[in-house]
Image (cartoon, rainbow, N blue to C red):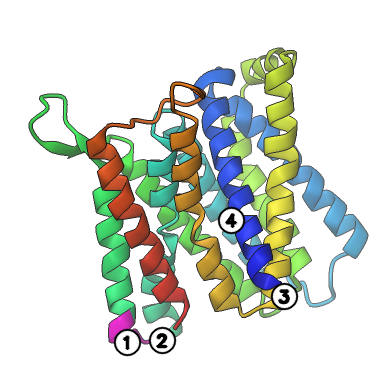
């Protein structure tokens, strides 16, 4: 049962990523409009959870601050991802962001005293090599393969996601998951709120008048992401967490498949590059990343 739940969560997260790309590239005037909507959703769910569950007696100021730091780091990671996703290919961007387990591992070695065996080092190499391969694209002179100028943003996003997971892991030792999730979301909302401008509110109201944009915003940004999170948590509760997270790491593969399908002549909803060269690179690099994450989390 946990396998079905984990695959379902991975598929839903991939759909959310595709909707993010579609909104940022075609439907929304700027990233801050999506930031406003995301802040509203996160604040709403966080307040509802805290209102229903209350604050546990073990929630000391120190542990609350730790949860907030996890949210702040995750907020920076999400904002960097949104900024790059507006201009970068969805499959490329999501694949790079999903290399965050490598940063979790590298930080856990000095901070938590963890040890890497040879297989885990091989996994790290696969992730690094796959990330580097999928991050390169042909330069303007058509002679050399150069990194996209948005690659540093995506690498920074991946690092922030990894740091957020590491801090959240520490917080979960003292607080229940709903409380950590709620406080973390408040931290994320605080970061994303920094991008809000008055004209962004006007842009949001204008965009929501369009029926298609409104449906995408409600389904893809206010409902589906939280269903995916809930289903993922259900999978973790039913199965081994290492195996569940390995299945969730298949998200870049689903993003690649969906993005390629939606970039064909029959479904020209995205503008993913579908040349033989880019398809060959992605077909090789995405499985490398997925295999590396699977090895890293299954040991």
Give the alpha-carbon distance from disc 4 to disc 3, as whole Å. 16 Å
Count of numbered badges drawn on the protein:
4
The answer for how far apart the CA atoms under marks 1 and 2 are is 13 Å
Q: Residue at x 7, y 31 (%)?
A: 143
Comparing 201 with 208, the one in front is: 208
Instruction: Provide the residue designation for mark 4.
Output: 10
Residue lying at the far left of the rendered structure: 143
Q: CA distance from mark 4 to mark 1?
A: 28 Å
Marks 3 and 2: which is nearer the front? Answer: 3
Q: Is residue 64 above or below residue 136?
A: below
Q: Quarter of the image for the N terminus: give it.
A: bottom right
Say which of marks 4 and 2 sits in front: 4
Label 2 environment density (alpha carbons within 10 Å; few <14, some 14–19, many ≥20): few
In the image, is 6 to the left or to the right of 96?
right
Instruction: Give the label, 4 or 3, closer to the camera.
Output: 4
Residue ID at (44%, 26%): 264
- Which numbered marker is on residue 237? 3
Dots 1, 2 in contact, CB < 8 A: no
Residue 114 covered by magenta stretch = yes
Q: Which of the 4 quarters of the picture holds residue 204?
A: top right
Identify the mark at residue 117; answer none if there is no mark.
1
Q: Identify the residue under disc 2.
A: 113
Magenta residue span: 113-119
Q: Residues within 10 Å of mark 1 (few under 14, many from 20)?
A: few
Disc number lying in front (4 or 1): 4
Q: Residue furthest front?
A: 266
Disc 1, SS = loop
């Amino acid at each position: 049962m946990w396998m079905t739940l984990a695959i379902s969560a991975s598929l839903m997260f991939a759909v959310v990523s595709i909707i993010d790309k579609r909104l940022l590239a075609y439907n929304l005037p700027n990233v801050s409009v999506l930031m406003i909507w995301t802040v509203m959703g996160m604040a709403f769910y966080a307040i509802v959870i805290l209102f229903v569950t209350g604050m546990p007696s073990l929630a000391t100021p120190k542990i609350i601050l730790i949860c907030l730091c996890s949210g702040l780091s995750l907020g920076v990671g999400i904002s960097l991802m949104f900024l790059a996703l507006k201009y970068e290919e969805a499959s490329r961007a999501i694949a790079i962001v999903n290399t965050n387990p490598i940063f979790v591992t590298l930080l856990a070695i000095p901070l938590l005293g963890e040890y890497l065996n040879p297989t885990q080092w091989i996994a790290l190499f696969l992730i690094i090599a796959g990330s580097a391969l999928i991050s390169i694209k042909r330069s303007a002179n058509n002679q050399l393969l150069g990194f996209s100028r948005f690659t540093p943003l995506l690498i920074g996003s991946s690092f922030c996601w990894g740091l957020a997971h590491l801090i959240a892991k520490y917080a979960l030792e003292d607080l229940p998951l709903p409380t950590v999730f709620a406080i973390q979301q408040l931290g994320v909302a605080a970061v994303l709120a920094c991008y809000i401008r008055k004209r962004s509110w006007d842009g949001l109201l204008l965009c929501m008048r369009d029926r298609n944009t409104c449906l995408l915003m409600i389904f893809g940004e206010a409902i589906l992401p939280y269903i995916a999170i809930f289903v993922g948590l259900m999978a973790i509760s039913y199965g081994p967490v290492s195996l569940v997270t390995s299945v969730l790491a298949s998200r870049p593969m689903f993003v690649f498949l969906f993005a390629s399908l939606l970039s064909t002549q029959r479904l020209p909803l995205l503008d993913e590059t579908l040349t033989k060269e880019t398809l060959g690179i992605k077909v090789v690099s995405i499985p490398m990343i997925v295999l590396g994450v699977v090895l890293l989390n299954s040991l």
